[in-house]
Image (tube, grey):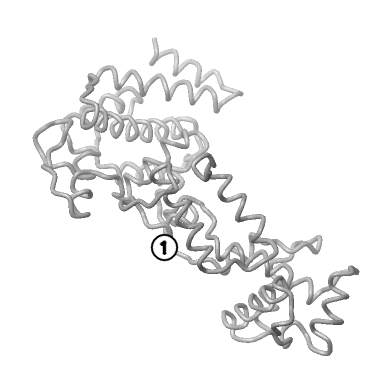
Amino acid sequence: MLESYSFSTLFGLENYWCKTLLLPKALVKLLNKFCRNYLWHNSVENQKIYMKSWATCCCPWEEGGLNIKEILSWNRAHLCKWVWRMLNPPVSLWTTWNAEYNMKNSTIWTANISPHHSESWRSILTTRDFLLHMYGNAAKAEEQLISCVDATGRFQVAKIYEHIRPHYARVRWAKAIWNSSIIPKYSFICSLAVQKKLLTVDNINRHGLCLMNRCTLCRRSSETHTHLFFKCEFTDALWRRLLGWMQVMGRTNDLRTELTWCTSRRRHKHWKMNWFRCCLSAAIYVIWQERNARLFAEKESSLSNLVKQIQFVVGVRILDRHSKISDEVVAHLNSIYG
């Protein structure tokens, strides 16, 4: 049954229950396994090889992740909203009943957990205990909850989630990859490539397999991320042609250096920089697709065909993302497309 679900459907199912109950750890682990297997293998069945740990996937793009919500933290963030409601109760039957029968003469910070309480109320008190443990005392925990309330008095779950989720070091190349001008699947492959998480032959051999390590594109050197992007003769020639097409001359580097270069540009929102980012991500994607086609399907495309394919995709994408296109852009595209 789960085979027919999309990735968003799996998260939608958990998101419904996250708002009212604290999910059991065994269930969280099972949901993580389903989502992880579906992401990497398009199947919820058990798999052995994952390109990236699920923990690092569940963090924002700026920290090298895939901007996926971490289930346990997202669950606790929703329950923090109910803790806040008991601290600042609106006029409602729910808050009045809990104050009278569950808390009695205590506050939300001092109320005891009883086996006679409902599962939803025990979930709220367990979240209360988590906040006390995280911030040290009730005053600091309440101060943190207050900081998550907007000007209209509404509690913002996303803000408290940012406080309680696991954090990782920020990466500089995130804005160059996760950009609205780039096709999402290109961004996905490019993010794996820059972190050296694609299943190149050297990565596969680290998992215990013994394959002959030979680049399928140039057939000369060993296949690694550094070699594939862009130290390989084939990919270096492809990228040089694209640099000439974009009129960026006199340089070619590895992938991380190229991302650093386009991230550090002052006019990073200019259409030419978006064009460069889109072209770079498309080149990474096409190179990886060509490598897989040669390795698994024994199909080979010429360098010229791959360059034309990238040029067409990038041209269409730029025109699509710039609806109010200027005369400068039209003149430039006319000059390069002839």
Q: Nearer the viewer, residue 263 or 318?
A: 318
197 relative position to 77: left or right:
left
- Residue 255 location (% of width, % of height): 29, 42
Q: Residue at horizontal 35%, vertical 43%?
A: 259
Q: Nearer the viewer, residue 192 or 103?
A: 103
Q: Is residue 281 above or below residue 119?
A: above
Q: Nearer the viewer, residue 61 or 189?
A: 189
Q: Residue furthest left?
A: 220
91 relative position to 81: left or right:
right
- Residue 137 location (% of width, % of height): 64, 86
Indicate the quadrant containing the C terminus: top left, top right, bottom left or bottom right: top left
Q: Is residue 293 above or below residue 332?
A: below
Q: Is residue 223 above or below residue 28?
A: above
**Crowd tier of the residue under label 1, counting other residues whose Cα lies within 10 Å: few below 14, some 14–19, many 20 or above:** few
- Residue 323 location (% of width, % of height): 60, 24
Q: Residue at horizontal 15%, vertical 31%?
A: 233
Residue picked out by circle 1 = 169
Q: Secondary structure at mark 1?
A: loop
Query: What is the total number of numbered labels drawn onto the structure image?
Result: 1
Q: Residue at horizontal 41%, vertical 45%?
A: 263
- Amino acid at circle 1: Ala
27 relative position to 155: left or right:
left
- Residue 165 location (% of width, % of height): 53, 66
Q: Residue furthest front?
A: 1
